[in-house]
Amino acid sequence: DAKTTQPTSMDCAEGRAANLPCNHSTISGNEYVYWYRQIHSQGPQYIIHGLKNNETNEMASLIITEDRKSSTLILPHATLRDTAVYYCIVRPGNTGGFKTIFGAGTRLFVKA
Amino acid sequence: GAVVSQHPSWVICKSGTSVKIECRSLDFQATTMFWYRQFPKQSLMLMATSNEGSKATYEQGVEKDKFLINHASLTLSTLTVTSAHPEDSSFYICSAREQWGTPGRVKLFFGSGTQLSVL
C-alpha cells in the first residue's frame, strides 16, 4: 500500500473551514484516496473517497491535485463535534482484498 | 448507510480466561472482515483478515493461536482472545467490506469497537 504523510495535529476555530492535507507521492494509478475519522473511543467513520476528480458529499469535500500526489480534505464549517483523528488512506479500488492500513492520522481540534 | 454491529462494547475479564468478540454486518453481506487493535493514543493496527468459509490471514507478529478468528457466515465474524493477559488489554475494532461493488465504490464499515480490560 502507498504510504501517506499527514500533519500530527491541527487546530480550527468553530464555524471556520478545516483543511486537512495529505501527501501520497507514491500513489499508483489504480489507487483511490480515502478519508476516515475516528472520534474518541469509537470505530472509524467513512468520510469520502476519490480517484482523481474532486468529490463532495454532505460531510466534506476532497480536493486531489492533478498529479494525485497530494489531497486535501475540507470540512466547510467545522463544529466541536468534528474534533477527531482524521486518517488519509490510499488503496487499490479493486474488489479483492481491500486491506486497509492506517497511518498516524491528524488530530483535529475544533475550538469554540 | 451500512451498519456493522460489534459486541460487547466493553468487557473486563480475569487473566487466563478467554473472551469472544462478535462482529456482524446488519444489512449487507460481507465476505471479508478485518480485525484491528488500538492502544491508547495510537493508530489502528491491522491484526488479521477474515474471509468467510476459510482461514483467516494474520499480519506479521500476530499470534494466530492467541487470537482465534472464525468467519462462518457472510454476516458474522468472531475474534476470541484466548488465555487473555493484561498486555492484551486494548480497543479491538472490526470492519466489514461489502460483497459487491464496482472498483472504488467498495466501502469499509467499522464497528464501534470493544474495550477489553484484563485484570
Image: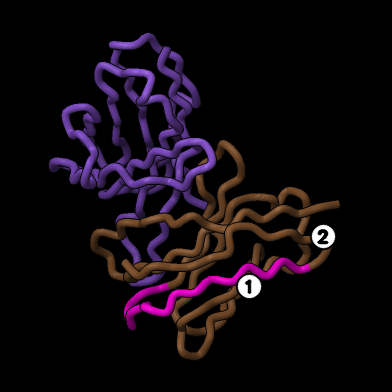
Alpha-carbon span between mark 2 and mark 1: 18 Å
**Chain for numbered disc 2:** A
- Tag 1 or tag 2, which sits nearer the N-term? 2
The reply to the same-chain question for discs 2 and 1 is yes
Numbered range of the magenta stretch: A17-32
Q: Quadrant of residue A77?
A: bottom right
Say which colour chain B has. Answer: purple
| Residue found 21% across the figure and 46% down from its top | B60
Determine which of the numbered discs, if any, sits on residue A61 in the image: 1
Dot in front, 2 or 1: 2
Supply the letter of whichever chain is brown: A
Residue B65 lies, in percent from the top left, at 16, 28
Q: Toward the viewer: A57 or A112? A: A112
Magenta segment includes B79: no
Residue A4 lies, in percent from the top left, at 44, 68
Q: Is residue B102 visible?
A: no
Mark 2 lies on a secondary structure that is strand
| Residue found 63% across the figure and 57% down from its top | A9
Q: Quadrant of residue B119?
A: top left
Q: Residue furthest right?
A: A112
Q: Give the color scheme: rainbow, by chain, secondary structure or one colour.
A: by chain
Position above or below: A36 against B25: below
Residue B21 lies, in percent from the top left, at 36, 27
Determine which of the numbered discs, if any, sits on residue B96 in the image: none
Q: Residue tagged by mark 2?
A: A13
Mark 1 lies on a secondary structure that is strand
Position above or below: B89 against B108: above
Q: Is residue A49 visible?
A: yes
Q: Residues within 10 Å of mark 1 (few under 14, many from 20)?
A: many
| Residue found 36% across the figure and 75% down from its top | A31
Q: Amino acid at mark 2?
A: Ala
